Image: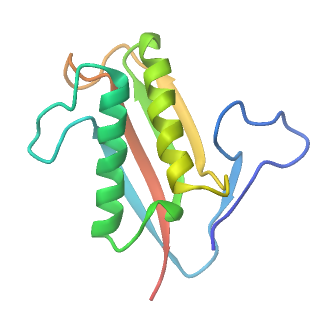
């Protein structure tokens, strides 16, 4: 089982994430490329960060399922936003997903940066992930 925690000696997390995650031996690492807010047919989920974040996180969940994993196996999320204007929408959609995925508040680690632009101008959000799945 992945161990996640935020130890004493550092400030508490300012959001829904853990400062540390330890992957025990016997786990396969999955690296998920950055996911943007598109539906399976490639259409943009919406013009705003909230709808794009929901779609990106759904894409991550679907990729995990395809690899025989689920959100509980996430070790790290890394998000890139194309503007600080997208922070509120991103945080709202992320909070919804994390509340659903982690009712016990055992959140994965997380980093967020704001960049000048993403791959195309209409993209507000991109989220990549790392997961660890027990070997069978």
Which residue ends up furthest to the right in the rendered image?
9
Q: In the shown orientation, is residue 131 left or right of residue 82?
A: right
Q: Position of residue 24 (x, y in %)?
A: 64, 74
Query: Which residue ends up furthest to the left in the rendered image?
Result: 41
Name above or below for residue 98 compared with residue 48. Answer: below
Residue 74, above or below 79: below
> Where residue 8 appears, x then y in whole percent?
90, 45
Q: Residue at x 48, y 37 (%)?
A: 94
Question: Is 33 placed left or right of 88 in the picture?
Answer: left
Quadrant holding the N terminus: bottom right
Q: Position of residue 120 (x, y in %)?
A: 19, 22
Quadrant the C terminus occupies: bottom left
The mark tally for this picture is: 0
In the displayed structure, 36 sits above or below 122; it is below
Residue at image point 47% right, 60% down: 71
Residue 35 in which image quadrant: top left
The residue at 36%/34% (across/down) is 53
Q: How is the image coloured?
A: rainbow
Is residue 17 shown above or below 121? below
């Amino acid at each position: 089982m992945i161990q996640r925690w935020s130890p004493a000696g550092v400030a508490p997390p300012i959001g829904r994430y853990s400062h540390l995650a330890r992957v025990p031996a016997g786990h396969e690492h999955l690296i998920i490329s950055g996911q943007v807010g598109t539906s399976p047919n490639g259409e943009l989920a919406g013009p705003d960060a909230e709808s794009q974040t929901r779609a990106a996180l759904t894409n991550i969940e679907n990729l995990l399922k395809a690899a025989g994993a689920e959100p509980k196996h996430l070790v790290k999320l890394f998000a890139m936003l194309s503007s600080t204007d997208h922070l509120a929408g991103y945080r709202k959609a992320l909070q919804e997903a994390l509340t659903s995925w982690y009712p016990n508040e055992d959140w994965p680690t997380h980093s967020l940066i704001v960049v000048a632009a993403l791959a195309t101008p209409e993209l507000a959000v991109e989220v990549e992930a790392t997961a660890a799945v027990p070997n069978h």
